[in-house]
Image (spheres, grey):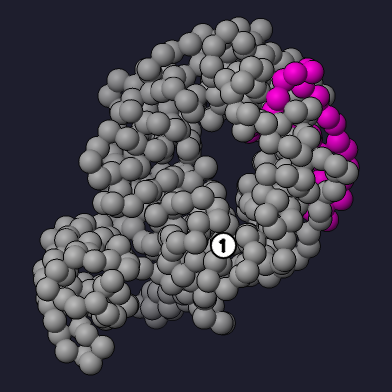
Amino acid sequence: MRKFNIATLYMILALQAQSFCQTTTFEYLLSTPQNEVVRDIYETSDGSIYVTGFVTKPYGFWDKANGIVVKISNEGQFSDSVIFDYANKRYSIKNILPDSNNCFVLSGYSSDTILQQGSSYENGSIELKKINSSLEVLSKNTFAFPIGYRYQNMLSRRGKNNDILVGGSVVLNYFVPNLFFYVLNNDLDSIKASFYHDTMRTCYAIKQLSDTTYWIADGSYPDYYTLDNSLQLTDYEYAMPHSINEPLGIKWDTDTSFFLAGEWNDGPDDDIGFFKQFHPTDSTGNIFNTWGTLDTLDIPAADALDYKNKDSIFIGGTTNFGFYYFPTPSWYFIIQTDSNLNVRWERFYGGDAHYIMWKIIASNDGGCIIAGTRYDYQNVTEEELDIHILKLNSEGLLVGTPEGPTIEIHEALVFPNPGTNYLKVRIAAQHKQSMFELYDINGRQVLTQQIFGKWGEVNTVFLTSGTYIYKIYNTEGLHESGKWIKQ
C-alpha cells in the first residue's frame, strides 16, 4: 500500500509538471510598411488565435482601409491571413464571433473614405461574413444605412438562439450620435432593426437578457437601456454607478449580474474604475474599486475586462496614453483581481515604443492575451502601426520563450523621464514597501529614498543636468533599474 501511494504521488506530480510546462507564452508582431490595426481577438479551444482589424497606407489611418484577419498558432507562429479589399471603400472588421463547425462570423462596416464631422463616414453599411478556419468566405450579407445616416461606431455580440446583435451609432446632424440596433439570425439575415433619433445615445455594450429583452450600456452618459421584443426603448438615466465615463469592458457572470471596467473621473489620481453589479439596471449594493497612476493618462482597453475563473479577473489598458502616433513611451498595464475586485498584482509592459491596448482576453490555460498596436517611433520614418500580441501566463509573465521577448515587463515606473526638479515612482500593488536609489554615471550614489505604497515623489532639485541610473528594489522580489535624465 505504501509503494502504491508513493507511485501515485509521483504520477500526480508528473502530470502537474507536464500541465505546467504546457503553458505557452509568446510575443507576436505583425509589421509591414503598412498600418496594421487590431480590432478584435479570439482564442479557439485548441489555442489558435484569430485577430481582426484593418490595414491602411502610412498617414492614411482615417482613409481607405482593407479588412484583415490573421491566424496565429498556439505557439505564437503565423499560420494564415486574408485581406478583404473593397475598392474605394473603408472596410474594417470590428468583431469575430464563434460559430458552429469551427467557423466564425466577421462583423464590420464599410463606408466612404473621407472622415466627416462627428468622426463619421457617409454611405455606411454593416458587413457580415461567415468564414471557416481556413479563412474562406462561406456566406456574406450587407445592410446599408438609410441615405444621410453617417456611420460612427458599432459592436456585435451573440444573443440567444445563436442570433447576432449589432448596436452602434449613426450621425444625422453635425456630430450628434444616434443609437441603432439590429437583430440578425445565424444565416446573416435581418430579423428586426431600429434607429433612435430622439436624443444623443451611443452603444458600448450589448446583452440579450431574455427572449424578449435586450440590454445596452451607453458610452456618453452613465445610462442603461432596455429594449423589448419590438425594440421599444426604456431609458435608465444615471443608473451606471461611480461616475464611470465609458464602460470599456463587461463580463456577465450570471443572467443578471456583471463585472464592468471603465474610465473613471471622480478621483485625484485613479483613472480606472471597476465594479460588480448584481442587477442589469439597479446598481444598489455594487462592489467597487479603482486603479491609476499619478500624473499619467491611463485609459482602459476598448475591451478591458475578462476572465475564465471569476476569482482571477484580468483588467487591462494603456498607461501614458496618447494617440496612435504619439512619439512618447507608453505601457500596457494589467491588473489581476479576485472576485471581490481586490487587486492581487499589476504589471506594466513596454516603454520602448508607443503601445495602445485594444483588448484583453483570458486564455484557456489560465493566463491572458493582449491585443494592441505598437508605434515604434524611435526606429521608423513614417507613421506606421503594427499589430502586437502578447500571450502571458497567470502571473502576467512571458516565460520559456526560445528567443528573448523584445518588450520589457516592469513592476515599477519612473516619470517624467526626462524630468527636471522631481521624479515620481509608481510601484506595483503587490509591493507595499520599496527602496529607490539614484546613481550618477560614475556609479556614485547621489540619493536614496524609501517608498511606501504605490507611489512616491523624489526631490531632484540639487542634481545637475545629466544621465542617472536608478534602482528600485525590496526583499520580496522587486528589482527594477534604468536610466533617468535630468534636463
**Above or below, comparing residue 183 to residue 264 in the picture:** above
The image quadrant where one finds the N terminus is bottom left
Q: Nearer the viewer, residue 316 or 343?
A: 316
Quadrant of residue 230 within the rendered picture: top right
* Residue at the image position 36 percent from the left and 68 percent from the top: 410
Using the image as rendered, state which of residue 369 and residue 322 is in the foreground. 322
The kind of residue tagged 1 is: Tyr
The percent position of residue 360, horizontal first and vertical second, equals: 51, 50
Q: On the rendered structure, is 331 left or right of 144? A: left
Q: Is residue 419 above or below residue 405?
A: above
**Magenta stretch, overall SS:** strand
Q: Position of residue 104 (x, y in %)?
A: 75, 44
Q: In front here: 232 or 299?
A: 299
Name the residue: 63% across, 69% down. Answer: 381
Label count reads: 1
Residue position for label 1: 375
From this viewpoint, which residue is outermost toward the bottom? Answer: 442
Q: Few, some or many C-alpha atoms within 10 Å of disc 1 (few <14, some 14-19, many ≥20)?
A: many
Percent from the top left, x then y, of residue 406? 52, 75
User: From the viewer's perspective, is 28 left or right of 346?
Assistant: right
Task: Tell me if I can see residue 249 in this picture.
Answer: yes
Of 259 and 45, which appears nearest the observer?
259
* 351 in the magenta segment: no
Give the quarter of the figure containing the C terminus: bottom left
Q: Secondary structure at mark 1?
A: strand
Give the residues in magenta: 126-155
| Residue at image point 16% right, 89% down | 444
